[in-house]
Structure formats: C-alpha cells, structure tokens
Amino acid sequence: MAKKKRSANSPPSSTAVSSAPPAQVADETRASDKASANRLGLYIAIAGIVAVLAIGGALVWLNRSSGNSSSPPKLASGWAPGPVNLCRGAPKFPTKLGFSNAVAFSTSERLNKGLELIEPGAGGSLEYAKRYQDPTWTMGGYLGVFVADRDGNVYVAPSPRISLIDNPPDKANILYKVDTNSGVMSEYLNLPTDTPPSSENPYGILALTYDCDTNSLYVTSVMGSTRAKQVGRIYRVDLKTGQVADQYDGVDAFGVAPFNLPTGKRLYFGSARTPEVYSIALDGEGNFSGEPRLEVTLNGAFNKPRRIDFNARNQMLVRGIDFNFTLSATSEDRRTDYLFGYDPANDKWTQLAP
C-alpha cells in the first residue's frame, strides 16, 4: 500500500538558497549557459506549433534519447551523480510503419485530439513528411505531458483544453501507456486519490518523469485541490509492478525531475502555486525520505515551474509559465527559461540565466 508522508496542510521546510548569479562568469560560459536555456525551449515546442494551454501539449523528438538500456554505474555511496534519464529509449513501432529515425510524438496539435506521430519535411520544412495516429491514441481525450522508459514504452497523461467534454475531471488522474512494439495505447493506471475533483480546478496529472536507476515513474497530480486547500500528490510508480509504490501527500507540484547529487538521489519539483522549486531525498528504491527543502526561487516574469530538466553539465534548467488552475489560453511565448548551476561545496544552486 502506498504511504502517506505528511498531512495536506503541512508546508515544506524552507531552507533558503540564494538565486543571485555569480559575480563573475567567463564570456564563453555565459554563451554556453544561454544556449542551454534555449535548448530547453526547443525540447518542448517547434516553431509554428503552439500549445492551447500553458500545460496543454508537448512535442519531443524521439531520437534525442540515447536508447542505452544499461543502468549507470554505482558509486560506493550510491548512484552515480548527474542526470538519471539518459537510458530512455525510442519506441520500436514507428520503423514498422515506415518512419525514419527523425520522428516526434506531439500532443500540441491545436485541432487534433490525442497523440500524433510526425516526421519533419526535407530541408527543415515546417510541413510534415508523414503523420500517423493510431485509433487508440484519442481514448484519453486531449493529452499533455509524456515520457518514455528504457524500453521505449511511452506514458502520457490527459490535459483539458477549451472545455471538459473530452476530458472529464473524474478521468484526469488516469495514466496511459503506448506499447513500444505495437503502438497501441491502453489505460495503464488510475492514480488513487482521497479527494474528488473540484469545480475550482479541472486538472489532475500535471507532470511525469522517469528514473533509469530505479525504473520508476514519478507523477504529480493536483486533483481535488482548491484555492484554499492543497491536496495534491507526488506518486512513485514502480514500472516492474505497474503499481504505486510510494506517494507524498499535500503538495501541488508542477514540473518534476530526479537528479543524483554527490550526497544522494533527490527528486526536484516545482510548486504549482508559488515561484519555487523544492527537492526531497529518495532512498535506494526511489521512495520518498524526509521532508522537502526549498532549492531556488524564480524571479522572472513567468515563474510557475512548468518543467525541470538537467543537462550534461549537471545544470538545472527550469521553464516558468503562467498558471492559475484555470482553462485560460496561453502560448509558449509566455515563458521564462531559467538556468541554475550547482555549488557542491555549499550544496546550493545559483542562478546563471536569465
């Protein structure tokens, strides 16, 4: 049975970390940091493709994954420091359909419900060379975030758009899976909740991430939360069993990503209510340990941490957007991309950009 880690009204601990940029940074480092922040934008959307909502869609090129199915080496103190999602594999079924290696999944097509597989046109054309949608890919209504595991299975969550006709709130906590071999989508897991959907909040699942070390899927949900009450959860789904192995209660989390520090594994998550990024320690199985601590505060124009990612330089990239739990339309232009560097001597993150 999943464990409840804290009460719904208990706030995270507040170990403040300075977000001021370092006094001196070499020109070449600044340029590289800016490029890294820009890559975060390219990872989510392509020019001309705009999400209907702030959290309403994503487009990810499948050949960005390494496809390496081996686990990273362990150190004496635990897992190897650095990003933990490099083993993600590409699905196998697209090649059976005649697609090239340069293909992408998209949930950002404005007028198309569900998931789509697309292949770009020649010479960088914005016209797609091929498009495909399996008949099962609309079963969850309009979809949002998705992530692949080491075998290329894709997990995707619903995301309401203009209305709730295709995305009823009582189905907002259902996680779907696209099989790497067949390409067929099926209902994978209906995440448990003690609180029914609220008329003040049409959302359920907001974010997904994968941990190669423990073969875990971390899922954030805000189902049942209201303006006055925070009852969201972060779930750890064990992909070996297909069940919730652990959960952390009472937090409305947005973007989420695990990362291995020299001191151990932590799960980073952004608040859906405040411009803050927290982290919580994870044990050897990937379960939650202890209480969250405040890592950074976003100080830009758009500052709800929609997405968190870590690059090869062990820097944290955060995308901030507007978000207020309503179905208000927005575009990918209404964002601020942040870049943070880790200081191991002080166990702190400092802001490098913007």
Image: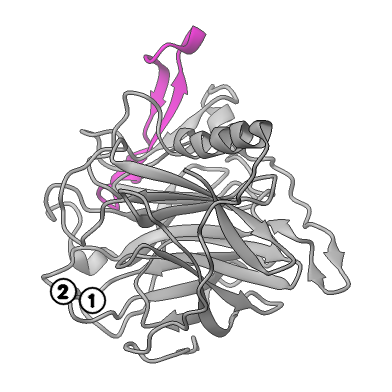
Q: How packed is label 1: few (under 14 Cα within 10 Å), some, or many (20 or more)?
A: many
Relative to 130, is 313 on the left or the right?
A: right
Asked whether the viewer can see residue 156, the reply is no
**Image spot of residue 239 (x, y percent):** 58, 66
Badge 1 amino acid: Gly
Magenta stretch encompasses residue 85: no
Question: In the orientation shown, which residue stands out farthest toward the right?
Answer: 76
The numbered mark, 2 or 1, whose residue comes first in the sequence reads: 2
**Span of residues in magenta:** 115-142
Drawn side of residue 264 relative to residue 34, left or right: right
What kind of element bears circle 2?
loop
Label number found at residue 198: 2
Tag 2 near tag 1, CB within 8 Å: yes
Q: CA distance from mark 2 to mark 1?
A: 5 Å
Question: In the depicted view, which residue is nearer to us: 241 or 195?
Answer: 195
Q: Quadrant of residue 46?
A: top left
Residue for point 35% across, 60% down:
206
